[in-house]
């Protein structure tokens, strides 16, 4: 997956920049949240995500995008919270997602969005010296949020759920979009 990600990014950038117009955009989002996977059901899990998106607005209300996501997380047993301790489990993941967006205009500068996508991901969970999850596969991407348009760039805040192989990641995100 790590070898496919740069190749996919170059192909996506090539495709979108060849047909660049004011409807083409690139976005960067950062998020924090929680993760859920079977081996840590009675632990407290935290997760972070960074994503780079290249999008195209098909109409004022519909759009599509390709997103590269990468993230990590840790898990600590509930009994160890408040003590100086190391994480019990470590989560690392990366994914490439193809998404469809629907925009709902609130004012001239504000809108809300809903996004649905499918992803291909690589997920790895390490527990002490073992690796209970090390797999790749298909998953889903769901997000919703608010955007404020400043002209050539936008800011946004939202929530995202990633369904990855055997792991679900829920995050609150902040991001910026630049149109070109």
Image (cartoon, rainbow, N blue to C red):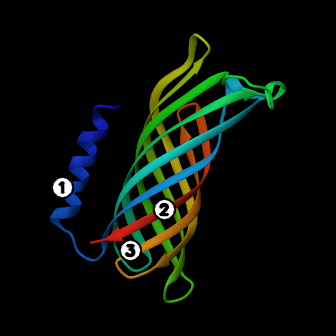
Instruction: Residue 153: give x, y in percent of width and height.
Output: 38, 74
- Given the current orientation, which residue lies at the most extreme left position? 18
Q: Label 2, label 1: how many angstroms apart (C-alpha)?
A: 23 Å
Cβ–Cβ under 8 Å for marks 2 and 1: no
Figure quadrant of the N terminus: top left
Residue 133 at what x, y percent from top left?
A: 55, 21
Mark 2 vs 3: CB contact within 8 A: no
Q: How many marks?
A: 3
Residue at 27 percent of width and 40 percent of height: 6
Q: Is residue 113 left or right of residue 151?
A: right
Q: Position of residue 20 (x, y in %)?
A: 21, 69
Whichever of labels 2 and 3 marks the residue nearer the N terminus, that label is 3
| Marks 1, 3: nearer the viewer | 3
| Most foreground residue, 81 or 138 | 81
Quarter of the figure that contains the C terminus: bottom left
Residue at 57 percent across and 84 percent down: it is: 106
The residue labelled by disc 1 is 14
Identify residue for label 2: 175
Sequence order check, earlier mark of 1 and 3? 1
Q: Residue at x 52, y 68 (%)?
A: 156
Q: Which residue does the numbered mark 3 point to in the structure image?
A: 153
């Amino acid at each position: 997956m790590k070898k496919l990600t740069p190749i996919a990014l170059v192909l996506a950038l090539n495709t979108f920049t060849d047909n660049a117009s004011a409807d083409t955009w690139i976005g960067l989002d950062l998020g924090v949240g929680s993760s859920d996977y079977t081996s840590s059901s009675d632990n407290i899990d935290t997760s972070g995500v960074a994503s780079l998106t290249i999008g195209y607005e098909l109409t004022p209300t519909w759009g599509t995008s390709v997103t590269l996501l990468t993230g990590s997380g840790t898990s600590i047993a509930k009994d160890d919270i408040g003590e100086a301790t190391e994480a019990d489990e470590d989560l690392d993941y990366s994914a490439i997602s193809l998404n469809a967006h629907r925009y709902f205009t609130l004012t001239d500068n504000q809108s809300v969005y809903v996004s649905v996508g499918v992803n291909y991901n690589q997920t790895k969970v390490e527990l002490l010296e073992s690796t209970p999850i090390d797999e790749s596969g298909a998953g889903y991407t769901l997000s919703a949020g608010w955007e404020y348009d400043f002209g050539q760039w936008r800011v946004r805040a939202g929530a995202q759920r990633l369904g990855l192989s055997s792991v679900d990641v829920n995050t609150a995100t902040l991001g910026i979009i630049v149109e070109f």
